[in-house]
Amino acid sequence: MIRLGLIGLGQRLAHMVTCFQASDPSLRVVGVVDPDRAGALSRLPESERSSVRFFDTLEELLREARPDALAIGTRCNLHAPVATAAASSGLPLFLEKPVAISLSQARALEHTFARSRSQVVVSFPLRVSHLCRMAKTRIEAGEIGRLEHVLGVNYVPYGNVYFDSWYRDYQITQGLFLQKATHDFDYLSCLAGAPIVRVAAMAQQGRVFRDRSQEPAEGDDSRAYFENIGRPETGMNEDASSALLEFANGIHGVYTQIFYSKHEAQARGATLSGLRGTLRFDWYQNELRLHSHAEAKTLVDHPPEGLNHFGGDGVLADNFIDVIRGRAPSASPLSAGLQSVYACLAARESAATGRFVTVQPLTDLAPAPLPSHPHAVPSPNLTLAGAPV
Ligand SMILES: NC(=O)c1ccc[n+]([C@@H]2O[C@H](COP(=O)([O-])OP(=O)(O)OC[C@H]3O[C@@H](n4cnc5c(N)ncnc54)[C@H](O)[C@@H]3O)[C@@H](O)[C@H]2O)c1
């Protein structure tokens, strides 16, 4: 039996608990810290509700419930402080993204975990998804020649969630590079085979998504009005943002994310180019295309259909169980979470200042090893409607 403790049992962690249990049915939730006890209880699987215990603090949970591992699913601003407090336990940790929302949080996390035995699995499903692994395998096999350029796109069809739910609170998210692009910078770095070292970025705020209270006279159909979403001057999530990326191995790339796309305009994926070929994949299409440059020939490949978060959540859950049982290292280590956060912070700074910004390097932790993707079979067909990745 695996005894799991949870800190912040919201929508995301409730879903991940079902993934953990699909991977290891012996897993039990033995303790929860969440100020919204009633809500947290209602989100737990029925089978856990009668036996679970709630605690006021992490220290109490550790002392009374004696967990084998912890999972942290609070909102973004608390990930780093809670993880930093959990590090001395030495327990395996599943940590939601972004792993930090400021440079000081990220540095504290890095410093603390350089001295901790805890292995961390950062909740980055895209890096371990089928499509990303298929693309990586083909790149490593030399099918496009040496990789020279990456283009990442994210036309988000559920962008309203960043303006009509708790995500609208800029104090909690610190913007959509940290909230959203953290996934994409991470998987692009995995595919590029090197961390991002320099960023130039732009962000548009307040052109499309507008705060209704500041504009009583509606009627402009180029705008979408929401309550309490802030203003560009005081900080708010962006309508769209883009970044020019330089990787440590000399590859460069572009990433763009758009939050007012809808329905079939949705797209998320990458185009990877080398001298010999171009490889394109899209998670919504669930398809990878390899275009040869030598002849007019395209190979089309498809991973299995119907996987939650494109299969990545199941693989992450399997990997977390393997880490707890000492069978495998983390497939999504803290160093990867931090490298992504440092790139997101550079993007945010560049968008604010109009300058190229050098990405902070890791100082205490060793860089993330290039992922050797786990070969676990993802847990099938778990669905969570409207869940932002
Ligand atoms: N990796 C992914 O693909 C993915 C997908 C969705 C969400 N997320 C991330 O998951 C996190 C949670 O998102 P959510 O939609 O579940 O939010 P949520 O609001 O449903 O859950 C947050 C939970 O934390 C609890 N909480 C608040 N303060 C707390 C405290 N001091 N200590 C302990 N618990 C506390 C809340 O009561 C709530 O139950 C976000 O940071 C989000 O970025 C990641």
Image: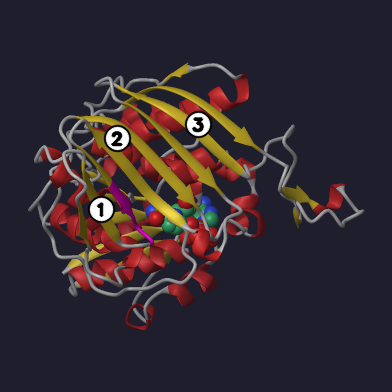
Question: Where is residue 355 drawn, in percent x and y?
Answer: 55, 16
Which label's residue is closer to the chain start, 2 or 3? 3
Q: Which residue extends farthest front? A: 296
| Residue type of the residue flagged with mark 3 | Ser
Region rendered in magenta: 280-284
Q: Magenta region, mostly helix, strand or loop?
A: strand
Compared with residue 211, is residue 361 higher up or lower down, i.e. above or below?
Answer: above
Question: Foreground: 149 or 42?
Answer: 149
Q: Are marks 3 and 1 in contact (CB under 8 Å)?
A: no
- On whether residue 150 falls in the magenta region, the answer is no
Task: Categorize mark 3 by other alpha carbons within 10 Å: few (<14), some (14-19), many (20+).
Answer: some
Picture disc at residue 102: 3
Measure the C-alpha gap from mark 2 to mark 1. 20 Å
* Circle 1: element type: strand
Disc 2: which residue: 189
Question: Where is residue 16 drawn, in percent x and y?
Answer: 34, 64
235 sits left or right of 51 in the view: right
Task: Categorize mark 1 by other alpha carbons within 10 Å: few (<14), some (14-19), many (20+).
Answer: some
Quadrant including the N terminus: bottom left
* Circle 3: element type: loop
Question: Foreground: 240 or 287?
Answer: 287
| Residue type of the residue flagged with mark 1 | Arg
Question: Foreground: 191 or 384?
Answer: 191
Q: Nearer the viewer, mark 3 or mark 1?
A: 1
Which label's residue is closer to the chain start, 2 or 1? 2
Picture disc at residue 318: none
Residue at horizontal 18%, vertical 52%?
A: 134
Disc 1: which residue: 289
Which label's residue is closer to the chain start, 3 or 1? 3
